[in-house]
Image (spheres, grey):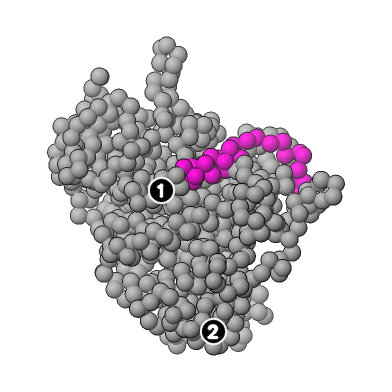
């Protein structure tokens, strides 16, 4: 084997970076914020026993009356029992008038599922009590079964539901409080076999279309999956994969089921379609990255292709492009490859999108002064907070699941300067006081996580009025104060200065700074609500707060890294360089990726971990792990961080390596195999 030249300075820098990360702790170490731990435990008791009770996913819940609310308060005031009926004398279905938010379940449920999955992984890593771990696993698997419904109920073939509803109760339970009769369910086709309704909308209720795969008369669904719902669904799929893959206590056929669902979605997105055959599209030509529906039409908000600007399609090869769609499609296709390891998806993501269509170059130069990018992720006071929220999720999937240093350099650059701290943007993520965004950023950044930011994030979460999370109307500024452009908030201390009003008469006005959660209007999904609004909320609603659970458990699981290292999935996959494998003189590819993860190398020298946590050399790429179990397909069960100086597209990475690994790394440095993307 040819030994590459290695810069000695790089060797010692690598050693220093590894050494610095040896003592890295989780962002929120267990017990460090004990009051927050207690509050989140209480909130989860609400979430799992009321909001997620119907089928394991995040739903809004509406109590019948004040007595019902009192029973919820009673249940959450104690921590001795998870049995709502035993504590209150009523089953939740008897005190909940209705459940709702099925139509946003793809995104809301997907983010909440991240909390579910990362809680399970954190408890397992920390050696939690077996009863607690078993309960977390049962909740995870129940949610996984429901998540699979999204891809079955439509009829399959990669078509995804926008939302789902199980409208029956389990045996022995009271009737489900939101019966099927209350929904306006329409057929997919009219009497002539044409799609129905004639004009595509943003979500129509449909009967089960699984052709007998699902139990009869049990599930219904909402169609027209939008790109925000899809990115949330794939986020949830990744979380399930991370938690279940290689776990000896989980049936691995469930992982294969997940891979099959992901392959279907990828095939649907990769297919090129002639857009002239569809209504609501302006332009002509063959385009991929279109979300399709079971009625054979694209969904209403279907476009993930960067050449589309909300259904207006630019010409193929146009200099102009939609930056938001570019970020979304990059994260989604990367995640689908991560879950499946499928070679076709790998080539599509790394060769077609990142190289041929120059997604990577477009992201790298997206913020240049002369950029042709059409960018609406941030728009000052006109910012739609859905957009930076969806961008956060897509960036998390694109970065956390990646190990190629050149790709990461570009993506980290956009994370920092394009999303987290956008220059001259008053609503950039860093200033929005959104716990989920803080946790996503801290889990991805390679610039170091400061104690100040960690404390700020814990304080933000602690400031929410959880356990129970009611939805009262909050009026910080009355009409006279809005007219005066200043008011004292409900805490009697905070001065709010108003700089913009969407509707002054209705009190829909924004402060110059994001409101602290202690005075902020509540929301059923805070991370996509406007944190600058001075007034809002209202209604007899028990908010699920799934994004807050996700923020908490991401911070409990992810490592608070020093500058130069970043968290990486323990299941990170080896892959081809950007642009594909270079050809050798015989015309065959020099090397081919089989989609395996780190540890399943292809013929160079490897450092693997023995059961006692020490490393021993073997034949394969250099991989340093942290002593956690390696599964049969090469996936490591746990692993926290990676230094970009140690990572390459073949899976060479560090996961908080022990000292013995550092010493062996010094001996094995000649085997480092940095593969570079083709320019």
Tell me the residue that label 2 is attached to: 68
Q: Nearer the viewer, residue 447 or 354?
A: 354
> Is residue 457 located in the magenta-colored stretch of the structure?
no
Q: Nearer the viewer, residue 604 or 357?
A: 604
- Residue at the spot x=73%, y=47% of the render? 295
* Mark in front: 1 vs 2: 1
Left or right: 499, with 677 as reference point: right
Image coordinates for residue 80, horizontal then vertical, percent: 35, 78
Name the quarter where the C terminus is drawn.
top left
- Residue at the spot x=40%, y=83% of the render? 77
What numbered label is drawn on residue 404?
A: none
Q: Nearer the viewer, residue 218 or 481?
A: 218
Instruction: Give the magenta part as a residue range.
Output: 255-282
> Is residue 256 located in the magenta-colored stretch of the structure?
yes
Image coordinates for residue 340, horizontal then vertical, percent: 47, 39
- Whether residue 19 appears in this view of the structure is yes
Tell me the residue that label 1 is attached to: 251
Left or right: 19, with 53 as reference point: left
């Amino acid at each position: 084997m040819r030994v590459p030249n290695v810069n000695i300075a790089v060797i010692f820098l690598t050693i220093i970076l590894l050494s610095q990360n040896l003592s890295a702790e989780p962002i929120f170490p267990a017990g460090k914020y004990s009051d927050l731990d207690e509050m989140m435990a209480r909130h989860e008791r609400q979430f799992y026993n009321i909001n997620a009770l119907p089928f394991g996913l995040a739903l809004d819940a509406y109590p019948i009356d004040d007595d019902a609310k009192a029973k919820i308060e009673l249940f959450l005031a104690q921590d001795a029992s998870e049995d709502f009926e035993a504590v209150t004398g009523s089953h939740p279905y008897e005190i909940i008038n209705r459940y709702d938010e099925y139509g946003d379940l793809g995104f809301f449920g997907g983010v909440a599922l991240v909390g579910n999955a990362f809680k399970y992984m954190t408890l397992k890593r920390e050696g939690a009590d077996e009863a607690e771990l078993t309960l977390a696993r049962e909740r995870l698997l129940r949610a996984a079964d429901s998540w699979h419904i999204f891809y079955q109920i439509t009829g399959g073939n990669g078509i995804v539901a926008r939302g789902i509803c199980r409208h029956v109760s389990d045996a022995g339970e009271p009737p489900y409080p939101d019966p099927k009769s209350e929904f306006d369910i329409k057929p997919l086709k009219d009497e002539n076999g044409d799609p129905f309704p004639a004009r595509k909308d943003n979500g129509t209720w449909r009967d089960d279309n699984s052709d007998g795969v699902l139990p009869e008369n049990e599930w219904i669904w909402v169609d027209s999956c939008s790109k925000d719902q899809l990115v949330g669904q794939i986020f949830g799929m990744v979380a399930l994969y991370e938690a279940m893959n290689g776990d000896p206590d989980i049936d691995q056929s469930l992982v294969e089921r997940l891979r099959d669902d992901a392959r279907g979605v990828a095939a649907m997105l990769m297919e090129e379609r002639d857009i002239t055959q569809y209504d609501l599209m302006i332009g002509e030509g063959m385009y991929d990255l279109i979300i399709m529906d079971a009625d054979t039409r694209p969904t209403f908000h279907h476009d993930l292709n960067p050449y589309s600007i909300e259904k207006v399609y630019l010409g193929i090869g146009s200099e102009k492009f939609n930056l938001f769609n570019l970020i979304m499609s990059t994260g989604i296709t990367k995640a689908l490859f991560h879950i499946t390891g499928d070679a076709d998806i790998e080539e599509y993501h790394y060769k077609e999108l990142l190289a041929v269509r120059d997604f990577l170059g477009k992201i790298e130069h997206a913020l240049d002064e002369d950029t042709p990018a059409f960018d609406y992720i941030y728009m000052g006071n006109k910012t739609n907070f859905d957009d930076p929220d969806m961008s956060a999720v897509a960036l998390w999937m694109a970065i956390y699941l990646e190990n190629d240093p050149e790709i990461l350099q570009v993506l980290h650059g956009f994370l920092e300067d394009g999303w987290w701290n956008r220059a001259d943007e008053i609503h950039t993520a860093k200033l929005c006081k959104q716990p989920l965004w803080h946790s996503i950023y801290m889990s991805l950044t390679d610039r170091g996580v400061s104690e100040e930011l960690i404390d700020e994030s814990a304080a933000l979460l602690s400031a929410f009025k959880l356990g129970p999370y009611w939805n009262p109307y909050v009026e910080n500024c009355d009409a006279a104060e809005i007219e005066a452009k200043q008011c004292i908030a409900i805490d009697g201390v905070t001065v709010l200065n108003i700089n913009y009003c969407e509707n002054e008469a209705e009190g829909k006005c924004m402060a110059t700074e994001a409101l602290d959660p202690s005075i902020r209007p509540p929301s059923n999904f805070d991370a996509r609500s406007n944190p600058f609004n001075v007034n809002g909320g209202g209604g007899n609603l028990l908010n699920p707060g799934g994004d807050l659970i996700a923020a908490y458990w991401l911070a409990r699981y992810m490592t608070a890294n020093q500058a130069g290292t970043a968290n990486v999935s323990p299941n990170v996959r080896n892959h081809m360089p950007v642009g594909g494998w270079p050809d050798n003189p015989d015309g065959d590819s020099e090397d081919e990726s089989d989609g395996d993860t780190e540890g399943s190398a292809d013929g160079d020298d490897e450092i693997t971990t023995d059961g006692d946590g020490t490393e021993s050399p073997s034949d394969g790429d250099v991989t340093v792990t942290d002593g956690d179990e390696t599964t049969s397909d090469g996936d490591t069960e746990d692993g926290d961080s990676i230094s970009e100086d140690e990572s390459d597209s073949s899976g060479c990475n560090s996961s908080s390596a022990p000292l013995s690994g550092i010493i062996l790394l010094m001996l094995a440095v000649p085997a480092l195999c940095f593969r570079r993307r083709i320019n």
